[in-house]
Image (cartoon, helix red, strand yellow):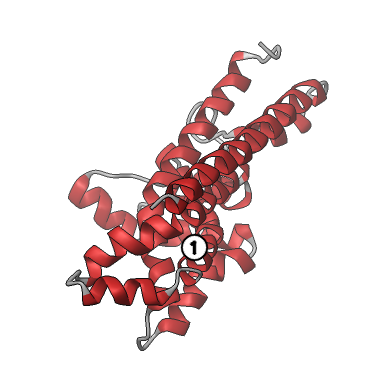
């Protein structure tokens, strides 16, 4: 199918795995960050907002280098994870997922934050007057009403993770079968004579995956909106 070589298929499958893990792992934190920025009034809120959006404005290579400093085997977090839990992120596909998740996090949080801000606070107050606690109100009122935005944020994060290159290659390098994702494979093919054909094939695959993710997001968001409207 598509005439892809085994190495090209390997890159596509690895990219899907990396993007899926990155999205699922970062989504709970994205919801918490979006809720804190949308509803929270606390010291350090501006600092949190800056920290969340920093990967969006920093060069991806800088973000990847920071991850390497922190999560590398000699980094403070990386050394702790390896010595305590035996987890190694640098130059592993799990590290690629971490880098992709960090790069997609700002887009995810922004969509979730806007969705939560669009929820009428009076509905949350009404739930509180009926005896619902803050956690129950969030799961029963806020989250269902903000669900289309949460889905949109997850898809944006997934799409960004699929296309992430700079931070990933800086943090985990370009190792065939381990960290060579779809963008890295395209870059590699463009560096060798006769590799343009493979690069074009993978570009088509990337477009198909991106369009498919957006279409699926729209379908899921419409279903969520219909379900909310029927409440």
Of residues 221 and 180, the one drawn nearer to the viewer in this rendering = 221
Instruction: Look at 33% across and 44% down and name the residue there.
Output: 88
Q: Can residue 95 be seen in the rendering of this structure?
A: no
In the picture, measured across the screen, residue 191 lies left or right of residue 45, that is: right
Q: Quadrant of the N terminus?
A: top right
Residue at the spot of label 1: 109
Instruction: Look at 56% across and 42% down and name the residue there.
Output: 217
For label 1, count other residues whose C-alpha is less than 10 Å away and answer few (under 14), some (14-19) or many (20+). Answer: many
In the picture, measured across the screen, residue 62 lies left or right of residue 41, that is: right
Residue furthest to the front in view is 230
Of residues 134 and 159, the one drawn nearer to the viewer in this rendering = 134
Residue 8 x %, y %: 63, 21
Label 1's element? helix
Identify the image quadrant of residue 34.
bottom left
Residue 156 x %, y %: 57, 50
Is 87 placed above or below 16 here?
below
Instruction: Look at 55% across and 70% down and name the residue there.
Output: 54
Identify the image quadrant of residue 174.
top right
């Amino acid at each position: 199918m598509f005439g892809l070589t085994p190495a090209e298929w390997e890159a596509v499958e690895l990219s899907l795995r990396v993007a899926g893990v990155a999205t699922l792992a970062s989504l709970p934190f994205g919801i918490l960050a979006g809720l804190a920025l949308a509803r929270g009034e606390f010291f350090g809120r501006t600092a949190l907002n800056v920290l969340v959006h920093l990967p969006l404005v920093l060069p991806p290579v800088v973000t990847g280098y920071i991850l390497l400093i922190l999560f590398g085997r000699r980094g403070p977090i990386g050394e702790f994870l390896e010595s305590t839990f035996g987890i190694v992120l640098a130059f592993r596909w799990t590290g690629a997922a971490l880098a992709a998740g960090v790069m997609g996090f700002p887009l995810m949080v922004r969509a979730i934050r806007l969705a939560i801000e669009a929820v009428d606070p009076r509905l949350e107050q009404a739930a509180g007057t009926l005896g619902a606690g803050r956690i129950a109100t969030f799961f029963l009122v806020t989250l269902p009403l903000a669900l289309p935005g949460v889905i949109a944020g997850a898809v944006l994060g997934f799409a960004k993770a699929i296309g992430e290159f700079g931070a990933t290659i800086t943090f985990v390098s370009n190792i065939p079968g381990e960290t060579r994702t779809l963008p890295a494979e395209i870059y590699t093919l463009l560096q060798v004579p006769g590799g343009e054909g493979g690069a074009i094939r993978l570009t088509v695959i990337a477009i198909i995956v991106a369009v498919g993710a957006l279409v699926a997001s729209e379908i899921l968001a419409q279903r969520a909106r219909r379900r909310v409207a029927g409440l």
